[in-house]
Each structure stands twice: as structure tokens, then as C-alpha cells.
């Protein structure tokens, strides 16, 4: 952002009177029984005298919670609690609820409603990540020195949060995605640079300068589909894969509750896996089928059970 010199721009409004406010922010990844508070650690990078600095926590409260979206921040000179008055534009959201073993990768608005099931207290994590414009130049440096870009619906989104480093003591990594084949290639950079989202036909992310020691990391080169849709008792998931790997197929109802799961072995080439609903299972309506590999969703479908 050229106007405010921040990597992520929000319109900020100070709370003039916060005497009656409950303490909003404690570093924690555990939701509370009453508030259902969910934490996502991130960096609010502020530009001052040639340096990016400042870090904090953003508190997201889902449906049934007791607070608005808020952020605690510390820029080295001033500390405080402020509310975000951000535009309710489209954001990329990641939700993980271990109670019902559901992980959702989708694009929602900033007004997120999600209800947890299965237990009174849950560990839940949520990430709100702004869409990356094709011509936006990003300064990306993270705590673990990895900067990642993921593709959702053929658009690029920032996945991790990033902190500033002013030395070249650590290596800086980023991920290059080829959306045509889903291949992920990691490249190592030995100096701090700006990453630029290049609007080329492959929607990849390029460094302004050179790379050293290109690396190839795990890929998910698959094509999959489900049929029939709608279905009555059984549905088939067809997976065409370039390699062999174990996976788990999950089925969730419209409320995010797990209906069933099935462990499968995916082999190179075409694979057909039948998901059977027994007569005792009266679930019907809109269902979500996800294919999970090493705790990461690699494909997802919406189906209708009659």
C-alpha cells in the first residue's frame, strides 16, 4: 500500500472509552467455553523510517461469541487495542475444528459464522487472508522464514503471516505454483527481496531477482470427480493421480459434522472409490466430500444425497 506504507491496509478506529471492556487478547490457541474465542497469530507490518515492524494478534469470534473482530498491536512506541473497520470484502479463510475433524478452505466475507460441535471446549484455528492482486508487490518474510502463496478458484492468496528481518542471516523461501498442473516448486533465496505476483498465464509467483538452489517439494498432481450427483445410497469418487499415496475421504453434512470417513490407497492412474451409506444412516441433502492427504485437503466436492 503506497498510501500508508503497510503490507496489509486496514482503516483503523481507536476505542475512545474502553473502561468497561473485558480483556480482549491473551496469547492462546484454545477457545473458551463462553466466548468461543479463536486466535490467529499474524503480523501487522508498519512502515517507519525505512523499516517494517510491529506484530500482534487478531481475535476472530465466530457465531455465539462475545466480541467483534479485533486486533492487539505493539509497534514499539505505542501499544493498544483497536478495532478493525475493514471493508467486508472477500477473504480467504481456513478453519480447523478438531472436535469434528473438519478443515475448510474457502473464500468467505469478513463476517464469519461457524459453530463447533462435539465438545464444550475446543482448540480451533482460523486464518483470514486478503486476496493478492496480480500487480501487487509484497514484502514477505515469516517467522519460520517461509512465504507461501496458495491458489483458490484460480486466484492467488497469501497463506502465511510475515515478519520483517533486516539482515540476510536467514534464508528466505517462497513457493511457486503452476496452476495448470498443480505442481508446487520451492525455491531458496539467500537475500531479502520483494516478491511480486506476476499475472502470467500460469499465475505463478516470481522473485524480482535470482534464485539459488531450486527445490521441488511435495506435489498434488491429481484430477478427481464424483458421480452420480445427486445420488441415493452410494457415490463414487474417481481420482486420477500421477503418483501413489495414502489418503482419507471425509463426508460432512451441511452443518460441518462428519458423517463418515474412509481410508484409501491412491495409485498412479485412475482410481475409483465407492462411498456407501448404510440403511441406518438417514443423512440427506447437501454434503461435502473432501480428499485429505497428510492432513491437507487436496480436493473437495459438493454433492446432494436424496
Image (tube, rainbow, N blue to C red):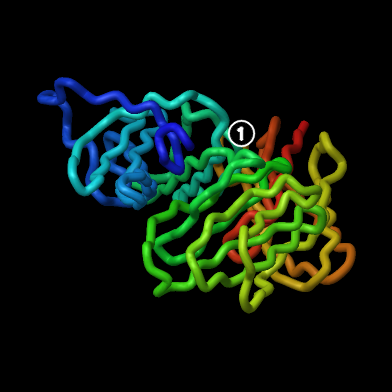
Residue located 38% across and 26% down the image:
11
Which sits in the foreground, 98 or 217? Answer: 217
Q: Is residue 74 left or right of residue 154?
A: left
Residue drawn at 39 percent across, 56 percent down: 163
Residue 55 showing in the rendered view: no
Q: Is residue 59 shown above or below 208? A: above
Q: Is residue 150 visible?
A: yes
Q: Position of residue 33 (x, y in %)?
A: 28, 40
Q: Which residue is mark 1?
A: 254
- Left or right: residue 289 compared with residue 225: left
Picture quadrant where residue 7 is located: top left
Q: Position of residue 60 (x, y in %)?
A: 38, 37
The percent position of residue 180, horizontal first and vertical second, equals 81, 54
Q: Residue at x 47, y 45 (%)?
A: 127
Outermost left residue: 19
**In the rendered picture of this protein, how many numbered marks are placed on residues?**
1
Q: Residue furthest top?
A: 16
Q: Vertically, is 300 above or below 148?
A: above
Given the current orientation, which residue lies at the most extreme front position? Answer: 49
Q: Is residue 146 left or right of residue 124?
A: right
Quadrant of the rendered image containing residue 248 = bottom right
> In which quadrant will I find the C terminus?
top right
* Element under disc 1: loop
Q: Residue at x 53, y 49 (%)?
A: 138
**What percent of the width, then of the height, locates residue 199?**
72, 45
Q: What crowding class fits label 1: few (fewer than 14 Cα within 10 Å), some (14-19), or many (20 or more)?
A: few
Between 205 and 300, the one nearer to me in the picture: 205
Given residues 172 and 221, the one toward you in this image is: 172
Q: Is residue 121 above or below residue 261?
A: above
Amino acid at each position: 500500500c503506497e498510501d500508508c506504507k503497510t503490507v496489509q491496509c486496514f482503516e483503523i478506529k481507536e476505542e475512545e472509552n474502553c473502561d468497561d471492556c473485558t480483556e480482549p487478547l491473551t496469547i492462546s490457541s484454545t477457545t473458551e467455553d463462553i466466548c468461543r474465542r479463536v486466535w490467529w497469530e499474524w503480523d501487522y507490518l508498519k512502515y517507519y523510517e525505512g523499516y517494517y515492524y510491529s506484530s500482534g494478534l487478531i481475535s476472530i469470534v465466530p457465531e455465539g461469541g462475545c466480541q467483534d473482530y479485533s486486533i492487539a498491536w505493539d509497534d514499539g512506541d505505542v501499544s493498544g487495542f483497536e478495532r478493525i473497520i475493514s471493508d467486508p470484502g472477500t477473504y480467504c479463510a481456513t478453519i480447523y475444528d478438531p472436535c469434528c475433524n473438519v478443515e475448510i478452505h474457502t473464500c468467505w466475507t469478513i463476517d464469519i459464522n461457524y459453530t463447533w460441535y462435539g465438545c464444550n471446549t475446543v482448540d480451533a484455528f482460523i486464518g483470514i487472508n486478503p486476496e493478492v492482486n496480480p500487480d501487487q508487490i509484497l514484502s514477505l518474510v515469516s517467522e519460520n522464514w517461509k512465504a507461501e502463496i496458495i491458489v483458490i478458484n484460480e486466484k492467488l492468496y497469501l497463506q502465511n503471516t510475515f515478519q520483517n528481518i533486516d539482515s540476510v542471516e536467514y534464508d528466505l523461501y517462497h513457493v511457486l505454483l503452476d496452476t495448470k498442473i498443480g505442481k508446487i516448486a520451492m525455491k531458496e533465496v539467500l537475500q531479502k527481496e520483494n516478491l511480486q505476483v506476476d499475472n502470467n498465464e500460469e499465475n505463478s509467483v516470481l522473485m524480482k531477482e535470482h534464485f539459488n538452489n531450486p527445490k521441488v517439494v511435495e506435489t498434488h498432481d491429481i484430477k478427481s470427480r464424483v458421480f452420480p450427483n445427486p445420488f441415493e445410497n452410494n457415490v463414487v469418487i474417481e481420482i486420477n493421480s500421477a503418483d501413489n499415496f495414502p489418503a482419507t475421504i471425509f463426508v460432512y453434512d451441511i452443518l460441518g459434522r462428519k458423517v463418515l470417513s474412509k481410508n484409501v490407497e491412491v495409485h498412479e492412474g485412475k482410481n475409483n472409490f465407492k462411498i456407501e451409506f448404510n440403511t441406518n444412516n438417514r443423512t440427506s441433502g447437501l454434503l461435502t466430500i473432501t480428499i485429505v492427504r497428510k492432513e491437507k485437503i487436496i480436493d473437495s466436492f459438493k454433492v446432494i444425497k436424496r
